[in-house]
Image: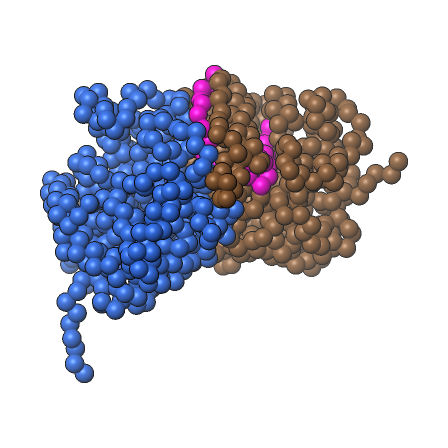
Chain colours: A brown, B blue
Amino acid sequence: MSKPHKQIILGAYLGGVNHHTLWSDPEAGSQIDFASFRHAAQTAERGRFDFFFLAEGLALRERLGLIFDQDVVGRPDTLPVLAALAAVTEHLGLIGTINATFNEPYELARQLSSLDHLSGGRAGWNVVTSFDAFTGANFRRAGFLHRDDRYTRAGEFLAAARELWDSWAADAVAADREAGVFLRDAKAGEFAFGGAQFDISGRFTTPRSPQGRPVILQAGVSPQGRDFAAGGADAIFSPYHRLDEAQEFYRDIRARAVRLGRPADAVKLLPHASFVLGESEADAIERHRDITRRQIGGRTAQILLETVWNRDLSGYDPDGPLPDVDPDPEGPPVVRGRARIAEDAHRRVAEWRALAETESYSLRDLAIHVFGRTEFVGTPEQVADRIDTFVQQDGSDGFILGSHLTPTGLDEFVDKVVPLLQERGSLRTDYTGTTLRDNLGLPYPDARPDARPDTLADAQPDVQPDATRVA
Amino acid sequence: MSSVPNPATPLHLAVALDGAGWHPAAWREPDARVDELFTARYWTDLVAEAEAGLLDFVTIEDALGLQSTGFDRVDDRTDQVRGRLDAVLIAARVAPSTRHIGLVPTATVTHTEPFHVSKAIATLDYVSLGRAGWRAQVSRPVDNAHFGRREQPAFTFADLGQPEVVAAVAETFAEARDFVEVVRRLWDSWEDDAEIRDAATGRFIDRDKLHYIDFVGPRFRVRGPSIVPRPPQGQPLVTVLAHDTVPYRLGADSADVVYVTPRDHDHAQAIVTEIRAEQRVAGRESETVHVFGDVVVVLDGSTAAARERKARLDDLDGAQYTSDAFVFTGTAAELADLLQDWQRAGLTGYRLRPAALPHDLHAITRELVPELQRRGVFRTSYDTGSLRSRLGLPRPANRYAAPVPAAAAS
């Protein structure tokens, strides 16, 4: 049985508020102005990408009690930007990261449903939770969520949101002016959901949206996180970029999906990736070297290592050896407002010391090695080949691509790499559907009058379930 | 050239968009776009029409609960429009397709996060290049169960005199006031020139120009700063609808525009007097606070035609339509007379509620506006400024910025 040629899923990610974004570059533009978002989204649509993606952070990062000032700081609110982008794009999916800890299902479900209506079926939600009191200081409910409850919260939130999205039948709005019947069902929108996190009931205000439910994205590598995502998400951020690791993860998630009663390919795996192109491979490597050294200057290198050491490392020479002190993971946090890098800081530091010893890395060299990784560096031909090979060999279903440059970083990818992927038959040359689910080849969540049987029948469980997990 | 000063004071004119219009039977009109109420095209077309009429801004109704004929319960009626989209997202969706008109969505303050509302409206201001506003609205007690986090006595309008209801209303509006305060502080939590992109020192921002707001109140504590830099207008327009002393106080204390519902000239005068007094109590007598009259409008070429249409709609709905606002039925010229009359009572503008869409919106933009222009009380083109500047509101100084000494200006 020959393996079908996969269509690569591509997402575009604009502007992180971290060291990846080179704000000092002469070409760097605003990370706030709508014109930047419009440019990036329209470029992605020109490149026939599946979706545009926005991240979120609900508190400005701090280091030792002071707001970070060396990286890009500040970004607009996710959902209004996506709603506005719906006005200037036609096919591109619009996926936002929204925190399930500091929102309520009723409000967020109607916002996402509204975005789906207003975009003609292009909305997606990347579900994240946070449990830190630092972010909680900006919200009514503060840091009430225990770390161990984060999947309970996310799971209940999603279940409640689904209850709300399903509370209007697809044909609930009759709008029959002759008969004077607006609603077919006097109880349209009626819902009730009870759980440890939410106990809510009443009437939902938003009729069922074009996709039925927005597309759900998840991240998560722990066994609990994997089951959560495999059981309920439409797509998962894969953290793995090495082909063998990525293939393990791919097999594992699909096996879990099947075990949880879903088709193997009901969940799409999408690593984040960045790229640097060059006229020749040597040129690309040189450009990459230059970009990375600008991204991770001495001060940024210290701060990146502080996220693991959890100590003030500003006194250590970036060009000298690694700090000789042990990490202090139990101490008060030095850096707040970003995810912890390591579960086990002592082990991670031991690994880094060994690596620095072998490679003769300075503090900054190590930071560049660890944090400066760019997945695709090469000529357009090389990058197209690597992306396609990775996907065809089941390392993932595609990539979410970001760049060091806001907002024009994607331009050269679309100009130079996209045509090559299209020539290979791995990327659409035009959109064929109208919704994000159509773009991704995902089924519609339940029967609607116009549900497309061809889309629903598209499941190809050609990969046998394989229960092996990444060790 | 002779210069003849026009003695008439210009009027501000906004239009309140909701569903198929404010009359509950509006959706049954032949020109109602009843199949499109939940589409972007519908809203884009309505706002484009309002912009073609040079209106100051549109408001977009919303609530965290389903529409109902009763305040204290959700009815099971199937013969009226039910369902809405999120108003802030409608406004954001419409923004790139329009250039001048202000966009003022409703966002609830009772169950929501001031941090989220602040960044949403700030972002609307960025997306619209300085045309954003916000109508702050408290939620009905009947919607509490949608959030499951708040106990409150259920009450109807008939119970408004009961002590526990008075207390609940006071508490709800006190929270609203805190909410607006937090939103405003967050808008100011970045000084305008906080983003410096100073490559020489490697600093993207001047962190001394970002501020913790450290708000502590009975319902929430918010630390800040916002994640969104100060929006183009500095402070987007804040508006509230008010029917009584407690909400008048909220408006006088916290808003730039207060929508009120006078029955007649004298009532308008009494309301304006009360709001101006509250404004003095709040220490804002030197600031511009607009008082806009809300009026539901049924407009036709003749008074008889308008009355006939109103009667026809009432028949379809099975009840005579009344509203918290005055329901005007007549011609554009008659409406212009009324607007000018109440303006003399102290109102600075109006928020007209079209009874049926698109009919009454077209009547406003294509008949009322030309009539007001002929009378010299309405603009004949847009200027290029922000929504605030259109309403004569300065771009406010940042409360956290060190004042610039006058001597330093040289």
Q: Residue at x 30, y 60 (%)?
A: B302
Q: Residue at x 72, y 50 (%)?
A: A427
Q: Residue at x 67, y 32 (%)?
A: A267
Q: Residue furthest bottom?
A: B1
State the residue in front, B378 or B131: B378
Q: How far across and how far down the image is residue B109, in percent? A: 33, 34
Q: How far across and how far down the image is residue B23, in percent? A: 36, 44
State the residue in front, A230 or A187: A187
A192 is higher (above) or lower (below) than A379: above
Q: Residue at x 19, y 39 (%)?
A: B248
> Is B9 on the left-hand or right-hand side of A134?
left
Would you say residue B393 is visible in this rendering?
no
Q: Residue furthest right?
A: A1
Q: Can you say which quadrant of the picture contains the N terminus of chain A?
A: top right
State the residue in front, B43 or B88: B43
Q: Quadrant of residue B300?
A: bottom left
Question: Is A217 colored magenta in this rendering?
Answer: yes
Q: How far across and how far down the image is residue A399, in percent? A: 65, 42
> Is B241 on the left-hand or right-hand side of B115?
left
- The kind of secondary structure the magenta stretch mainly shows is loop
Would you say residue A403 is visible in this rendering?
yes
State the residue in front, B89 or A202: A202
- Magenta residues (range): A196-220
Question: Is B6 colored magenta in this rendering?
Answer: no
Q: How far across and how far down the image is residue A345, in percent? A: 54, 24
Q: How many marks?
A: 0
B369 is higher (above) or lower (below) than A66: below
Q: Can you say which quadrant of the picture contains the C terminus of chain A?
A: top right
